Each structure stands twice: as C-alpha cells, then as structure tokens.
Amino acid sequence: MAQKKGGGTTKNGRDSKSKRLGVKIHNGQFVKAGNIIIRQKGTKFFPKKNTKLGKDYTIFSLISGKVLFIKRKKYTYISVI
C-alpha cells in the first residue's frame, strides 16, 4: 500500500518569452547610422526619410541624426534628419 499520494500534474506554468517590442529611440533623440528606432509586429509605424523597414518590420536609421515622428492622418512616419 502506498505511503504517499501520487503527485498531480499541471497543465499550466508555461509562458512565451517577451519579444521586447516598442520604441527604442524617441522623438527628438539623436541616433547613429544602423541603430534600431522601433521594433514592431506589422507596420504600425512607417519609414520615411533616411530610415528603412527590416524584414521583421523593424525600422532602423540609415544615417546619424535626429529622429522625427511625423503624424499624418492615420499613419505615423519616422524620419532621421
């Protein structure tokens, strides 16, 4: 006869790692060429002048300069000047 009850199992207790999305360099801050400005899922923000969109929708700087967030109608554009 068993002296202890069998330990139950749980179906909970797992979670995915955070993806660290969001704005990394804010409006008016200085950025170096190649720095990531924003990490996002899909195109919430769009690249404009001197920025590019990576294959995972990351927006990064092509030149060193000041970051500008430009709001036009329902879109937000990111430029570096």
Image (spheres, rainbow, N blue to C red):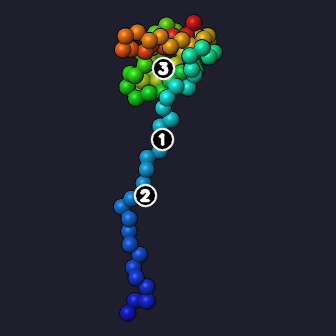
Residue closest to the eye, 42 or 72: 72
Tags 2 and 3 touching, CB below 8 Å: no
Distance Cα–Cα, label 1 vs label 2: 15 Å
Of label 1 and label 2, which has the lower sequence position?
A: 2
Find disc 2 in the rendering and name its residue: 13
**Residue 67 in picture, x, y percent from top left:** 57, 13
Mark pair 2, 3: CA separation: 34 Å
Q: Which mark is residue 59?
A: 3
Question: Is disc 1 in contact with disc 2, using a CB cutoff of under 8 Å?
Answer: no
Say few, some or many: other residues with alpha carbon within 10 Å of mark 1 (under 14 / 14 to 19 / 20 or more): few
Query: In this orientation, which residue lies closer to the viewer: 64 or 75?
Result: 75
Tell me the SS state at disc 1.
loop
Q: Which label was assigned to residue 18? A: 1
Secondary structure beneath label 2: loop
Which comes sooner in the sequence, label 2 or label 3?
2
Between the residue at mark 1 and the residue at mark 3, the CA separation in whole angstroms equals 19 Å
The residue closer to the viewer here, 41 or 56, is 41
Quarter of the rendering containing residue 64: top right
Spot occupied by residue 5 in the image (x, y as percentages of width and height): 40, 82
Answer whether residue 9 is visible to the viewer in this image.
Answer: yes
- Against 73, residue 26 (above or below) is below
Going by the numbered disc 1, the residue's amino acid type is: Ser
Amino acid type, mark 2: Gly
Q: Residue at x 60, y 11 (%)?
A: 66
Residue type at tag 3: Ile
Where residue 46 sits, quadrant-wise, is top left
In the rendered view of the protein, which quadrant contains the N terminus? bottom left
Residue plotted at (48% across, 41% down):
18
Q: Earlier in the sequence, mark 1 or mark 3?
A: 1
Query: Where residue 65 appears, x then y in whole percent?
Result: 61, 10
Q: Position of residue 22 (x, y in %)?
A: 49, 29
